[in-house]
Image: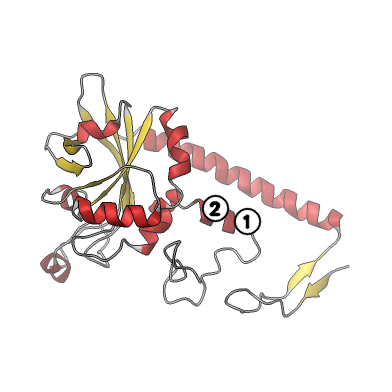
Amino acid sequence: MTTAIANVSRSPANHPLPDHSVVSRQQWLAERKKLLAREKELTRLGDQVAAERRALPWVRMDKEYLFDTPAGRRPLADLFDGHHQLVMEHFMLAPGWEQGCKSCSYMADHTDATLVHLAHRDTAFVAVSRAPLGEIERFRQRMGWKFRWVSSDGTDFNRDFHVTFTADEMASGKADYNFGAKPHGAELPGVSAFWKDDSGEVFHTYSTYGRGVEVMMHTYNLLDLTPKGRDEDGLDFTMAWVRHHDRYA
């Protein structure tokens, strides 16, 4: 026998969930097994795409970039912290901004607990922004983060990795974000990966932008398991609900 749940409130937005069927445990189990088959398809596809990602050709990083770090100016090769692999968050914090991007901060909130596990898989992590190091450190301390965060100020790094754009580029339509898309702002997020071989040479192996940066948003994965899901329908934009973690009511 199927019944319906009506007029269920949605906290905190207080919007009702649509009426939803309620069934016996046996009926639920049958439907769950159907969904499990689809989930396994998705898992296998994800494994296939991950293998194709690893098989991408690499680009040797011939151009030298010097980043401002708490230990002084350092080249990209020094950011690997003794590992062969480096994952980088292109964090939206431009010179003079009062605070970092809320969505980039949401990404970063998931990072500190992963650092020890990444290190045990030969992988370092670093965030990079255009803001001067002092402005980065002020915001990092406010947020309580422990991960390394360096400044690309004074370099072409952000522009070469297509996360910073000039007004002229955006007006002319020549700006290229996410491998062909038009950027919707002068500063945008991304995640990149690099490899350093035993001789010290560095290679760019992968970058992802747009919704690809959800790879760092573990909260979304959990919300996707719930009845309300991400609960973003009707918002001005998908992440309009996100706040810096010290600014939620």
Would you say 237 lies left or right of 129 here? right
Image coords of residue 1 (percent x, y):
89, 67
- Per the rendering, the mark at residue 53 is none
In the image, residue 114 sits, relative to residue 3, either above or below, namely: above
What secondary structure is found at the residue carrying circle 2?
A: helix
Image point (23%, 41%), residue name: 70
Image coords of residue 164 (percent x, y):
20, 58
Residue sitting farthest toward the right: 1
Disc 1 packing (10 Å; few <14; some 14–19; many ≥20) = few
Is the C-beta separation of discs 1 and 2 under 8 Å? yes
Q: Which residue is mark 1?
A: 225
Image point (26%, 35%), residue name: 79
Image coords of residue 25 (percent x, y):
85, 56
In this rendered view, identify the residue nearer to me: 175 or 76. 76
Inspect this view and state whether residue 144 appears.
yes
Inspect this view and state whether residue 178 appears.
no
What secondary structure is found at the residue carrying circle 1?
A: loop
In this rendered view, identify the residue nearer to me: 112 or 104. 112
The alpha-carbon separation of the residues under discs 1 and 2 comes to 7 Å
Q: Which residue is mark 2?
A: 221
In this rendered view, identify the residue nearer to me: 94 or 203. 94
